[in-house]
Amino acid sequence: MKSEKLLILLASLGVILLASSVGGTMASFFDQESSSNNTFEAWASTVWVQTTESDFNAGVLNNVDTSSSPGDVKLATTYNWYDTNWEYRRKITIDHTKVEDVADPSTTYANFPVLVYATGLSNIKADGADIRFTSSDGTTELPREIESYSGGTLYAWVKVTLTKDAGDADDDVIYMYYGNAAATEPAPDSPYGSQNVWDSNYKGVWHLSEDPSGPAPQVEDSTSNDNDGTSQGSMTTGDQVTGKIDGSLDFDGVDDFVGLSEPPASSTNINTGSVFAWIKTLNAGTSWRGIVVKQWAYGMYLYDNTFVIFDWTTFSNRSTGVNLADGSWHFVGFTFQSGTSDGTKLYIDGTEQLTATFTVANQDEGMVIGAGDNPGTWQFFSGIIDEARISNVVRSPDWIKTEYNNQNSPSAFCSVGDEEGFYYVSPGTIASQVLDTGVPGAIWDALFWDETLQSNTDITFEVRASDTYFEKDATEPSWIGLGTADSPILSGLPSGQYKQWRATLNTSDTSETPILHEVRVWRY
């Protein structure tokens, strides 16, 4: 009779296990177990399923990742990694000594467009479309504009929050990811696209790296304002030359300039703002030479080779008296608050040269780069101009000096680290939360799990149970190893009111990870 009961019990358990492996998510089912004297009584075997991200996160996790593929458990990567489709990254360290903080001992520059320059790069798509940048956490993406990527040389602009505390030697860190052959260039107006590098205060940013003989408008505005420019005069392909930053335009001083086609009520109609550009000339001459000019409103020139701005209200210039026709690159610009006494400042190479009063007149005319009307006669620049930009805010002296430090020597401002490959940490463990069955001595029927194993990976399980409550991360009771058995495990499972399982994920190939999809505990 005992053998008959055992045969019936095993047959019943077989039905239970078959049903659980097929259905996978049923809450419970009923079967019959024979008892003494050939009398049958009902008993219920209940399944505890763990398969969601919240299920797994409620346990104890060590070197595992539950978020990159929600509902799955994988090995964690060596660091927080932007996306596993990107194979490589480099750490970029911003030298805190190059971030100016003279005016404020605790400086934060939000939305600062940092120039990142790097050479000797590889494993990047030919057009650089797979390049992404993140903050120091390795995962939070930052807006970026790839000005150019060619032959392993990169010029990119990245929107960064720069910080510097006086006396603090902590550098800001960002990461550059690449190595995804399927990646495409983000749309310019997408959250991390090129236009969003330049916040709403920027009304025009012209890298001047385009061929001036191409289809009009040849010169693109990188901001969302679309203040694109068209080359004028006798500009040719040969006027696209090596600049301070990537390419630039060489103006002949006779009839070359870039005109922005815009109505009077445009984004460049400002009464407060900042205007900057890089220039290089050997002999501009004794006449007026327009650099960036909003006709009859605001603009900057060389006059008799010295850096000046012109006030159309008083028809007079505000001159630094500094001769810049020396064949070297110079970062020139000014900030202004129209009509404010001493509200205008002129800068050369990041250093303030002059404080003045400046009044913006009518703004019915357009904007030009490489020329200016002063007054009634066109005055053309003779030399090279690069990186022209205007903003509708007054940039602080420290911001301007930091811009100069970054653009004058980008490799000193940002050091680009060695290439890091993506790989997984091994081993990793995940212990479940503790299941309270509510029944002292509850029997552990079976342990099922669903997994995906690649070559050189495996998942092993341990279990424990007790009638005395224990915390999910407690050291007691002891774990019982189940070896390398495949799912399901039907024996060697401990009894007790409180039950817990722990899985260990392993790989001997750090480019591969096992994946745990679901765990099911049957008990009664």
Image: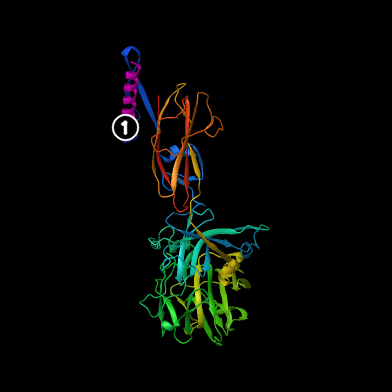
Is 197 displayed left or right of 413 in the figure? left
The magenta stretch is: 1-20
Identify the residue shown where x is 59% and y is 83%: 326
What secondary structure prevails in the magenta region?
helix
Binning the other alpha carbons within 10 Å of mark 1 as few (below 14), some (14 to 19) or many (20 upward) gives: few
The residue that label 1 is drawn on is 18
Q: Relative to the observer, which residue lies in front, 175 or 251?
A: 175
Question: Is residue 2 inside the magenta stretch?
Answer: yes
Q: Secondary structure at mark 1?
A: helix
Image quarter for residue 281?
bottom right
Q: Position of residue 184 (x, y in %)?
A: 38, 62
Q: Relative to the observer, which residue lies in front, 158 or 200?
A: 158
Q: Position of residue 454 (x, y in %)?
A: 40, 49
308 versus 342 height, above or below: below
Question: Is residue 225 inside the magenta stretch?
Answer: no
**Residue type at numbered disc 1:** Leu
